[in-house]
Amino acid sequence: MAVLTFTDRGIYCPAGDFHIDPWRPVDRALITHGHADHARPGHRAYLATQAAAPVIRHRLGDINLDTIRFGEMRRIGAANVSFHPAGHIPGSAQIRVEAGGEVWVVSGDYKTDADGLSEPFEPVRCHSFITECTFGLPVFSWRPAGEIAAEMNAWWSANAAAGKASILGAYSLGKAQRLLSLVDASIGPILTHGAVEATNAILRRQGYALPDTVAVTPETKAKDHPGALIVAPPAALGSAWARRFGDASTGFASGWMQLRGVRRRRATDRGFVISDHADWNGLLGAIRDTGAENIYVTHGYTDIFARHLNESGWSAQVVPTEFGGEDDETESAA
């Protein structure tokens, strides 16, 4: 029997009788990270890393959540389980499952380049690797984060000099905090949407280093914060919430900004190509480092990526899941 199987509820371990990031209610769910497509409500019991637990509780409410340290081995039924850094967002994990002498690893979402905020990605040796491939095309090749930071800071500085606010769209968990760690806080005040600020507060209490920010409230007036950078969920761009800042320039940060058509559809003044997912070379490097014989490819450019792997000597197959890629999270503009 395989260590992990693919069911209509999600990735299942028969030896341990648990699911990993299930998309329908189950008795026991092991959760890689807190994004909405991986951490869903309705399960009887949850297990996640200590680092991911506070934000998962914030998002899912009063759930039965047990925690585990990175690298700690836990026996569940007839399976040994451990969580290892995925480098995607703070607290995110790959999950290693060993049963009957065979090791499988579920990547969750991951990136291989350290961002100075998330726990750096850790390669885990295994026989079978279930990998995401959100950006599984050669066109996706990320430039150094320092170059993107310089672009964002130059855009913010120019807007401030012109008397404009700068509104930067980014998802409230992970991407927003990564951008805050990259911008130059000496340029001006940094304001945040309530959804971003709530996540900031959780991560600050955990010890993650973030610059000072000011939460936007109904009383916030643009004239009191000249030249500000405002970080908000994408849904807030172009909304009544954003219009309070008057003459403002808008930007959006995502790996999808590498594609001209996506930049055009976003209809923002600037697009910054920065992602919390591995690019083409990052995916291939991670797979090589696992030493895995069998690769299971989920969400993204699955068919193209699996074909490339098979032509390159791996045994790869596509596995349908209900996970999304970057920026599939739905957030309110409230």
Image (tube, helix red, strand yellow):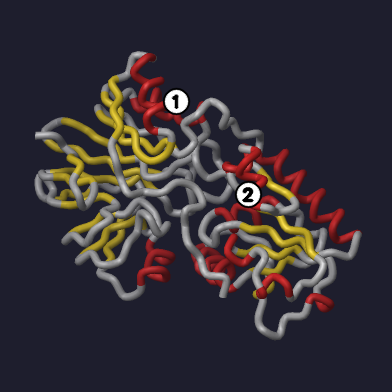
Residue 212 image offset from top left, x and y in percent: 68, 67
Left or right: 127 as drawn, with respect to 100: right
Mark 1 surroundings: few (<14), some (14-19) or many (≥20) residues within 10 A: some
Q: Nearer the viewer, mark 2 or mark 1?
A: 2
The quarter of the image holding the C terminus is bottom right
164 sits to left or right of 94: right
Q: Which mark is residue 284?
A: 1
Which residue in the protein does label 2 denote?
A: 265
Badge number at residue 57? none
Picture coordinates of residue 84, whole percent (x, y): 36, 43
Please tell me in which quadrant of the rendered image residue 197 appears.
bottom right
Comparing 323 with 113, the one in front is: 323
Name the spot of residue 148 as percent of width and height, x first: 70, 42
Quick check: 183 left or right of 299? Answer: right
What residue lies at 66% left-to-right and 35% top-to-bottom?
A: 144
Are there few (<14), some (14-19), or many (20+) residues within 10 Å of tag 2? few
Element type at marker 2? helix
Which residue sits at x=65%, y=34%?
143
Amino acid beneath label 1? Leu
On the picture, is 191 further left or further right than 165? left
Whether residues under marks 2 and 1 lie with C-beta atoms below 8 angstroms apart, the answer is no
| Amino acid on which the number 2 mark rests in the picture | Arg
Above or below — where is 133 with respect to 267?
A: above
- Residue 106 position within the rendered picture, expressed as x and y whole percent measured from the top left: 31, 40
Q: CA distance from mark 2 to mark 1?
A: 30 Å
Q: Secondary structure at mark 1?
A: helix
